[in-house]
Amino acid sequence: MSVSDWLISLEGTEGGRTLALWLALLAAVLHAFFGALQKGATDPWTSRTVIDGTYAAIAVPFLFVVPLPEPHIWPLFAIAWVIHVGYKMSQAASYTAGSYLVVYPVVRGISPVFTVIGAGILFGEIFSAVQWVGVACLVGGILGFSAYNLRHVTVDRATLPRAIGFACMTGGLVALYTTWDAYVIRATADPFTFIAWFFFLDGLAFPIGWLVLNRRLPTFDPRIAKLGLTGAVTAYFSFGSIMLATRLDKVGEAAVLRETSVLFSALISWLVLKEGVGPRRLALMALIAAGAVIVEWGG
């Protein structure tokens, strides 16, 4: 039995639900690492271009291994491509206009609410009252991090409203792509067909845009090249994990668990970067963790 057949056999089973839980948490940890990787490395447009170009190149050999997408999948891919390009442009604009520490929690705090609503519309998923309490705890904790950072991080007040506006737009687009990609990966016979072709097609937009605007490739820099490779591999496992989770179990629950990435980001800052946490941040971390537990328990 192939890996694809094994995953498909787990759909709708208790084993599939458990695997989806761990995949969503893996995506959260890797997403936190991905954010820390990009933070301060270079400008967001260059880093996005290098990372995307790298994971498009990595995808090429896998296109000859996975089955071809079915004819009805190509228009769905086209819609996904447009959503993801919009998301990445909005994200880069928000990071350019405002502090990462303020913008990132706003993006992650807004997206799970809209994803749960979108999953209800598209897949008929219904969250219980208890689960909505969990969502409120998690979102409150995440936005609390943004408010905390806003008070303690030096930011450019002149561009802050624009940064917050782009962050809210980005959060909405995260919810849109999460829901739509879940629909597409469920419409494909082999989930790895979606993942391989998605990374190839999605990775072309920013490099092509860079060439059109600059008429040259980015200047080679070993540090940026390392960022591109590390970021690309992280993106494969982060995005691939959450997409497989949405095929195996409820889209809304997987999306909520992924947004615990803010919790893991704070833990990385505390344990790895040796940054102080303090009682307020500890309380917010506990609130996020409690929200995730309540969502799973309530389901």
Image (cartoon, rainbow, N blue to C red):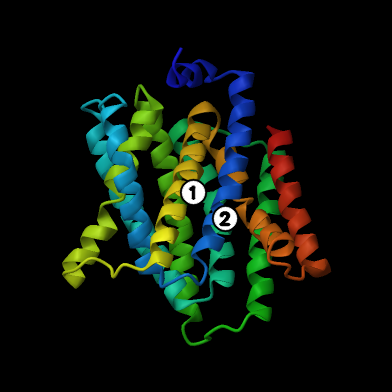
Kind of element beneath mark 2: helix
Q: Residue at x 38, y 56 (%)?
A: 51
Of the numbered discs 1 and 2, the one sitting upstream in the chain is 2
Q: Residue at x 81, y 69 (%)?
A: 278
Viewer-nearest residue: 285 or 31: 31
Q: CA distance from mark 1 to mark 2?
A: 8 Å
Q: Position of residue 48 (x, y in %)?
A: 37, 61
Note whether 25 is above or below 283 in the view shown. Answer: above
Q: Is residue 98 left or right of residue 196?
A: right
Q: Quadrant of the C terminus?
A: top right
Note whether 116 is above or below 190 in the view shown. Answer: below
Q: Position of residue 184 (x, y in %)?
A: 36, 34
**Amino acid bearing label 1:** Thr
Q: Which residue is mark 2?
A: 33
Task: Tally the numbered discs.
Answer: 2
Q: Residue at x 60, y 28 (%)?
A: 19
Note whether 86 is above or below 179 in the view shown. Answer: below
Q: Which residue is mark 1?
A: 234
Q: Residue at x 72, y 48 (%)?
A: 291
Q: Is residue 215 left or right of residue 155?
A: left
Find out whether the residues at labels 1 and 2 contact each other: C-beta distance under 8 Å. Answer: yes
Badge 2: few (under 14), some or many (20 or more) residues near its Cα, within 10 Å?
many
- Can you see residue 80? no
Q: Residue furthest front?
A: 222
**Amino acid bearing label 2:** Phe
- Can you see residue 233? yes
Q: Quadrant of residue 296?
A: top right
